Amino acid sequence: MNAGKSTAMLQVAHNYEEQGQQVRLFTAAIDDRYGVGKVTSRLGPQRETEVFTADTDFLQTVDKKIACVLVDEAQFLSKDQVKQLHQLAQVRGVPVITYGLRSDFLGEPFPGSAYLLALADDLEEIKNICTCGKKATMNIRVDENGKRIKEGEQISIGGNESYRQACGRCFYSETH
């Protein structure tokens, strides 16, 4: 989180469109932090997008005329949706680029992320920094007082007020 995933996605969409190519952008319907169907960078840029829900079938939704499919909040994809996106790329030749988190605030993989990691042809990590200065690879959920939360539902939508990025050492530290 807070690594620039949405900014990167918006830049990729811009690059394709600048070349006259059509892209389809999706984000999770459950992510309503900035309004449903919006990809928003904390740096300011924002764009209306299509939303995916548990019922979205990407094979039915995307045709070959599309130059690229871009998916934000990809951790919320289902196993079947990841397989659909993989099939779009492998069989139909439509490039698919997804952006999301690997794991939740407990260090558990999101189901969508686990299947993306298993099926992806290529992985590019967008780096972020822990408060200690090391590379952040984990997320910590915090309450309204900034105290760490160590139990709860896997999915809880929030931004900087609800989550902090952390390196592995700080994630396992009792002081965080």
Image (cartoon, rainbow, N blue to C red):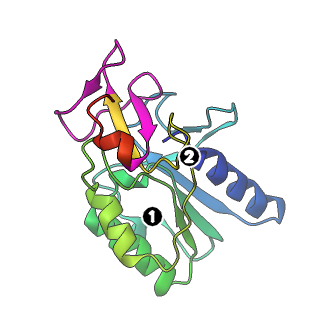
Residue at the (23%, 41%) spot, across then down: 154
Residue hosting label 2: 128
Principal SS element in the magenta part?
Answer: loop
Q: Secondary structure at mark 2?
A: loop
Is 43 left or right of 79, judged from the image as shown?
Answer: right
Residue 82: image x %, image y %? 36, 68
| Total numbered badges shown on the rendered structure | 2
Q: Which residues are magenta?
A: 142-168
Question: Which image quadrant: the C terminus?
Answer: top left
The three-letter amino acid code for the residue at tag 1 is Thr
Mark 2: few, some, or many residues within 10 Å (few <14, many ≥20)?
Answer: some
Task: Tell me which amino acid carries mark 2.
Answer: Asn
Left or right, residue 146 beside residue 23: left
Question: Label 1: which residue?
Answer: 61
Which residue occupies 64% across, 61% down? 23
Residue beneath the point at 28% across and 54% down: 110
Dot 1: element: helix
Up/down of 161 relative to 49, above or below? above
Direction bottom: furthest residue: 91
Spatial separation of the CA atoms under disc 1 and disc 2: 33 Å
Q: Earlier in the sequence, mark 1 or mark 2?
A: 1
Which dot, 1 or 2, sits closer to the camera?
Answer: 2
Residue 158 on image: x %, y %: 39, 29
